[in-house]
Image (spheres, rainbow, N blue to C red):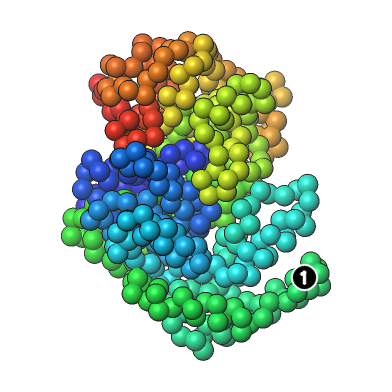
């Protein structure tokens, strides 16, 4: 009953779509499942030289024969969902094998409004949200005034829930933010417009996935965002509003933890993050600019330039621990082709004390100074390498060193964006 989790081991944008796509093309994958987040996520997959970007949809939507699942832990913008589907349909992608959980929560237009005005209100203390309503939708879920997919099919219930949700929000919008109140009927009308197209996609995804596992099917759970953005285990408050760690998969999909067989953490050969928050290895020099330029570090969903820094083994070990990783998938090794010498953060110094593990408090992490070890670069193009032995000796040394200090073995190594640009390292 193989159940595989693929998740981000840093701050996101690690190339999870490539790992998911690779798994789905090397082994028969029957189901690919999104379990958290919304359309603030972004995966880039290159298929036969053609680039595709998914946001709300699982990247498995590009795998023929696989069923794509948006599970109960996801917050769904119907407008974003159908816009993304229509874009793929225009490019000839078959999207018929998509199902959506009846218990997934809906992002309504007022969630995006609240998100944007509240973020602006924070001024210099902004968190760096995408403004797409993800946080407010999760807040409504926890406050028990959320709207779920199944509610769209009962107009009476939908209207009552929209009224309840807007009761307090309109007071805040008009009296705190000096904005116009949102009309209940306008929201109801907007949401009802999606029901007929959405209805055939909606199923009990928890039942579907458990029955699939019982039948020996292979289920791939695809993470959105990443470990360091987890609301409980990330760099709070500069985090997302859900639990993208491995434990969140079980809650977000309605499967028990004993069903999971492999947990793969996707990690770049350097580090990036989007938005605000601490980042110990961040670079503000030419090296940082070159990582951004060569790596094409622009957010798939946000269009924002990513902050760049060197590989952080402290974060890698932390991610391995809190997720129970069975292995890592290392991506974008080829981005480092032009460096003479490559630093790797192996620990932090905080107030004169060395920390080999993640500091306990936010204050300590904000004040963490990287302790680097240095590795010789390889100064050659590795994008054509297809075996570990094809890599230059210095690249092999770098990969082996990262593997030794990161807390889990490397399952694969990405040397370019294409499906074929992946190396499987030798196992002793």
In depth, the one of 419 and 262 nearer the eye is 419
Q: Secondary structure at mark 1?
A: loop
Residue that appears at 57% across and 18% down: 372
Q: Is residue 247 left or right of residue 63?
A: right
Q: In the picture, residue 137 is in which quadrant?
A: bottom right
- Percent of width and height locating residue 148: 48, 73
Position of the C terminus, as image quadrant, is top left
**Residue 315 position within the rendered picture, expressed as x and y whole percent measured from the top left:** 52, 33
Relative image position of residue 343 (x, y in whole percent): 54, 17
> Horizontal placement of 244 versus 239: left or right?
left
Q: Quadrant of residue 135?
A: bottom right
In terms of depth relative to the viewer, which is nearer, 235 or 109? 109
| Residue at 35% over, 47% down | 5
Question: Which residue is rendered at x = 38% and y = 67% of the image?
Answer: 100
The answer to whether one can see residue 375 in this image is no
On screen, 104 above or below 274?
Answer: below
Task: Describe residue 271's horizontal placement relative to residue 380 as left or right.
Answer: right
Identity of the residue furthest to the bottom in this view: 156
Residue drawn at (72%, 60%) of the image: 118
Q: Is residue 255 left or right of residue 304?
A: left
The residue where tag 1 is placed is 179
């Amino acid at each position: 009953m193989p159940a595989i989790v693929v998740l981000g081991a840093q701050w996101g944008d690690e190339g999870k779509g490539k790992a998911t796509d690779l798994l789905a093309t090397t082994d028969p994958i029957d189901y690919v499942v999104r379990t958290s987040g919304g359309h603030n996520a972004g995966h880039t997959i290159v298929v036969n030289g053609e680039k595709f970007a998914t946001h709300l949809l699982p990247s498995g939507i590009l795998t023929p024969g696989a069923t794509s699942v948006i599970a109960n832990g996801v917050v769904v913008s119907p407008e974003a969902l159908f816009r993304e589907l229509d874009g793929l349909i225009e490019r000839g992608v078959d999207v018929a094998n998509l199902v959506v959980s009846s218990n997934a929560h809906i992002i309504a237009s007022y969630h995006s409004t609240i998100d944007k005005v509240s973020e602006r209100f924070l001024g210099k203390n902004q968190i760096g949200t995408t403004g797409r309503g993800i946080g407010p939708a999760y807040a409504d879920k926890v406050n028990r005034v959320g709207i779920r997919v199944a509610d769209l099919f009962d107009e009476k219930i939908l209207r009552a829930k929209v009224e309840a949700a807007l009761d307090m929000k309109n007071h805040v919008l008009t009296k705190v933010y000096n904005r116009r109140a949102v009309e209940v009927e306008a929201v109801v009308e907007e949401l009802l417009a999606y029901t007929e197209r959405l209805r055939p996609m909606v199923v009990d995804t928890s039942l579907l996935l458990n029955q699939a596992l019982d039948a020996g099917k292979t289920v791939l759970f695809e993470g959105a965002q990443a470990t360091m953005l987890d609301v409980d285990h990330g760099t709070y408050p500069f985090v997302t509003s859900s639990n993208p760690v491995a434990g969140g998969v079980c809650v977000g999909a309605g499967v028990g933890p004993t069903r999971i067989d492999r947990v793969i953490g996707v990690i770049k050969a350097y580090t990036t993050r989007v938005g605000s928050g601490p980042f110990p290895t961040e670079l503000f020099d030419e090296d940082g600019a070159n990582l951004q330029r060569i790596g094409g570090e622009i957010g798939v969903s946000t269009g924002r330039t990513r902050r760049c820094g060197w590989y952080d083994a402290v974060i890698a070990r932390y991610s391995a621990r809190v997720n129970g990783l069975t292995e890592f998938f290392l991506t974008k090794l080829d981005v480092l082709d032009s460096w003479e010498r490559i630093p790797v953060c192996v620990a932090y110094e905080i107030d004169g004390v060395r920390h080999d593990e993640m500091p306990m408090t936010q204050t300590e992490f904000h004040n963490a100074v990287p302790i680097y070890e240095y590795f010789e670069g390889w100064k050659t193009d590795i994008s054509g390498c297809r075996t570990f032995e094809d890599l230059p000796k210095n690249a092999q040394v770098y990969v082996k060193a990262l593997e030794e200090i990161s807390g889990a073995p490397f399952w694969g190594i990405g040397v370019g964006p294409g499906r074929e640009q992946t190396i499987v390292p030798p196992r002793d």
